[in-house]
Image: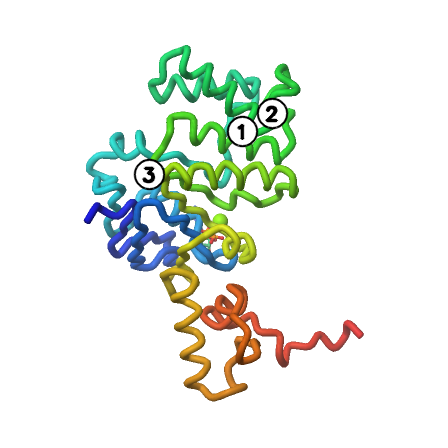
Amino acid sequence: MSAPAIATENLTRRFGQLLAVDHVNLSVAPGQFFGFLGPNGAGKSTTIKMLTGLLAPSEGRITILGTDLVADPVTVKRQIGVVPEGLALFGRLTGSEYLNFVGRMYGLDRKTAAQRAAELLDFMQLSDRPKALVTDYSHGMQKKLAMAAAVIHGPKILFLDEPFEGVDAIASGTLKAMLQRMIAHGATIFLTSHVLEIVERLCSHVAIIHQGRLVAQGSIDELRSGVEARVAGVGAGDGDAGARPHEKLTLEQIFLEIVGGARLTGQELTWLA
Ligand SMILES: Nc1ncnc2c1ncn2[C@@H]1O[C@H](COP(=O)(O)OP(=O)(O)O)[C@@H](O)[C@H]1O
Ligand SMILES: [Mg+2]
């Protein structure tokens, strides 16, 4: 068996008294389209920053494609691409200049970098204003450019923190097309999101983090079976997942059942009417 694409052992991060990520054991197989789900503040960004070497863990171990991240960060960083929370682009460059720069930083020769930069700008539909500076790009354009930069060296694993946040439907479609293409070529994708519909449509496997702790991990079908069994065990109509018996639970229903706390019953806002 080949090594997992991503594996963590007791991955933990403290901020003072706060346990932002609490002994998380993740395993992502190569080629998986993996969604890392959780409510706001659950610990998703903190986890992805540790997985990509942007933030040191307080405790625990991270292995990427069989390499220990702390022991050999350079080997890991050559093989991964990252679209971080804050994008971290250079505003005073054009999109083309930026992609060429990133390509060269990854060690591509000048010609290859230029060729890939041009192809990526076309694919992302960012070619029509070649003189525009990144700082003048819309948010959606910046996200597309960040994804282009993250894939220019042909990474085996792509990490994305909330890639569709604040992006319109057209740009989202382009981003998704790029992700599907990467998966078709055998890459592994790890994305965080608090938007369940996106994860349900794209991902084959998910993990759910809540208050820093991993509360579920597996294929969406596995999670569904687990919740259905639990709801059935509680007694018909007693579970809060809210689906009728013959309907397949949506990821949203699975999520609410596992994470709880967000149920609408009994929480009427009386002053609204
Ligand atoms: N640099 C930091 N210093 C202090 N607390 C932080 C820092 N980064 C994140 N946190 C806290 O850690 C928790 C998890 O944050 P984060 O990983 O950003 O959540 P998510 O991405 O799931 O919304 C939150 O309570 C957040 O306020
Ligand atoms: Mg976040």
Q: Quadrant of the C terminus?
A: bottom right
**Vertical order, 228 against 119 (above or below):** below
Residue on which the image places disc 3: 53
**Vertical order, 113 against 55 (above or below):** above
**Residue kind at label 3, given as amino acid type:** Gly
Residue on which the image places disc 1: 145
Crowding at mark 3 (Cα within 10 Å: few <14, some 14-19, many 20+): some
Residue on which the image places disc 2: 126
Q: Residue at x 46, y 27 (%)?
A: 149
| Front of the two marks 2 and 1 | 2
Q: Residue at x 49, y 68 (%)?
A: 254
Disc sitting over residue 79 in the figure: none
Pick whichever of labels 2 and 3 is earlier in the sequence.
Answer: 3
**Vertical order, 100 against 50 (above or below):** above
Report how far apart the C-alphas of labels 2 and 3 lie in the structure: 29 Å
**Residue kind at label 1, given as amino acid type:** Leu
- Mark 2, secondary structure of its residue: loop
Indicate left or right for 5 with 248 as reference.
left
Percent across and percent down for residue 59 are 26, 52
Pick whichever of labels 2 and 1 is earlier in the sequence.
Answer: 2
Write down the quadrant of residue 108 in the picture.
top left
**Residue kind at label 2, given as amino acid type:** Leu
Write down the quadrant of residue 265 in the picture.
bottom right
Residue located farthest toward the bottom when viewing the structure as drawn: 235
Tell me, yes or no, whether the two marked residues, 2 and 1, touch with CB atoms within 8 Å: yes
**Vertical order, 159 against 36 (above or below):** above
Tell me: is circle 1 under 8 Å from ligand 2. no
Write down the quadrant of residue 12 in the picture.
bottom left
